[in-house]
Image (tube, rainbow, N blue to C red):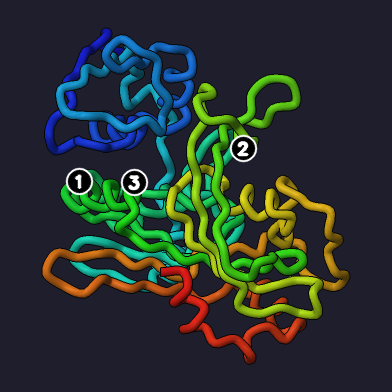
Amino acid sequence: MSGVQNLTVTKDEADIRLDRWFKRRFPHVPFGLVAKLARKGQVRVDGARVKPEDRLQPGQSVRVPPLPDPGELKETPSLSREDAAFARSLVIYQDEEIIAFNKPPGLPVQGGSKVTHHLDRLLDAFGRGEERPRLVHRLDKDTSGVLVVAKTAQAAKRLSKLFQGRDLKKTYWAVCLGVPAPRVGEIKGFMKKSSGGEGDREMMVPARHGEEGAQYALTRYAVADEAGRRVSWVLLRPETGRTHQLRVHMAAAGHSILGDGKYVCDIPTPEGLSRKLHLHARKLEIPRPGKKPLVIEAGLPAHMIDTFDALGLGPRADLSAVEAVLE
């Protein structure tokens, strides 16, 4: 077991998440242990407490507590052929910089307490060590659709900055309860993570400007089609990337996303429809220097296809016109 180390973040590690930094520097240390050490304050950055998802900047000093030797940890089992084949089956686009997946609903992006089957683990199918792809953004466990990973550190840095800004366009498809009015608009305000009492660490609640932990969020939306005022097909364009942003905003507007048991509204769910979350990251438009943007689209999951078919959503919609009003 090594002693305490104070390591300096390099230029190549700019904007990398703390947990990913550990993965690079200490590949044998599992995510769960990093999260535990950060929670206990044993991992610090420039003397301050941090979370696994916090991003690092060049020149910062990371306090690394004594870590177990590789032989002291349970060896992470290698991927089975079935898992590797499953990972490859999710690929919808690949080039020298990125791999894009159509993430199915129910598959977590990262591991955690009692979570051992997740997309990050499946990345072992594409390489180990420095060859291993790097996560640059997340989708909720129950949200499906386009998720990209970077093949190189340079690509990871560029994509991370794009996801933090507004140059990268994300378009989601959702089936919502009722029909938003007006049919085209935006939802904005401040939100923060709940804490204390009945607080769920992954529950977002409304907040006031200036309140500790408050983050501004903006979502543009447009109704593409509806089924007798009971439900609607809504295109969503998040201009910011807050936790659960789209789910929070649609519930706040009084039109929760079908299947969302956490952020609810007063409109009842029609009988006979799947209770899975109907939120899908349909399209990602990635700007490229000197080239046209790279457009990646992901097909709908089975439960959303069934709902579209059952309600007759889609045939009447002029999708190009709906997308145009989101620009």
Between the residue at mark 1 and the residue at mark 2, the CA separation in whole angstroms equals: 35 Å
Disc 1 versus disc 3: nearer the observer: 3
Which image quarter is the N terminus in?
top left
Residue 164: numbered disc: 3
Position of 9 with respect to 191 (left or right) is left
Between the residue at mark 1 and the residue at mark 3, the CA separation in whole angstroms equals: 24 Å
Of callouts 1 and 3, which one flags the residue occurring earlier in the amino acid sequence? 1
Instruction: Please report the residue visible at 40 percent of the width from the left and 33 percent of the height from the top.
Output: 53
Which image quarter is the C terminus in?
bottom left
SS class, disc 2 = strand
Of callouts 3 and 2, which one flags the residue occurring earlier in the amino acid sequence? 3
Name which residue type carries label 3: Gln
SS class, disc 3 = helix
Of callouts 1 and 2, which one flags the residue occurring earlier in the amino acid sequence? 1
Q: Give coordinates of residue 145: x percent, y percent.
A: 49, 65
Name which residue type carries label 2: Met
Q: Give coordinates of residue 71: x percent, y percent.
A: 34, 25
Q: Give coordinates of residue 36: x percent, y percent.
A: 48, 21
Position of 47 with respect to 116 (left or right) is left
Residue 130: numbered disc: 1
SS class, disc 1 = helix
Residue 13 occupies quadrant: top left
Name which residue type carries label 1: Glu
Contact (CB < 8 A) between labels 1 and 2? no
Instruction: Please report the residue visible at 70 percent of the width from the left and 72 percent of the height from the top.
Output: 232
Position of 85 with respect to 131 (left or right) is right
Neighbour tally class for label 3: few under 14, some 14-19, many 20 plus, Cα within 10 Å: few
Between the residue at mark 3 and the residue at mark 2, the CA separation in whole angstroms equals: 19 Å
Position of 169 with respect to 174 (left or right) is left
Q: 281 and 210: which one is in front?
A: 210
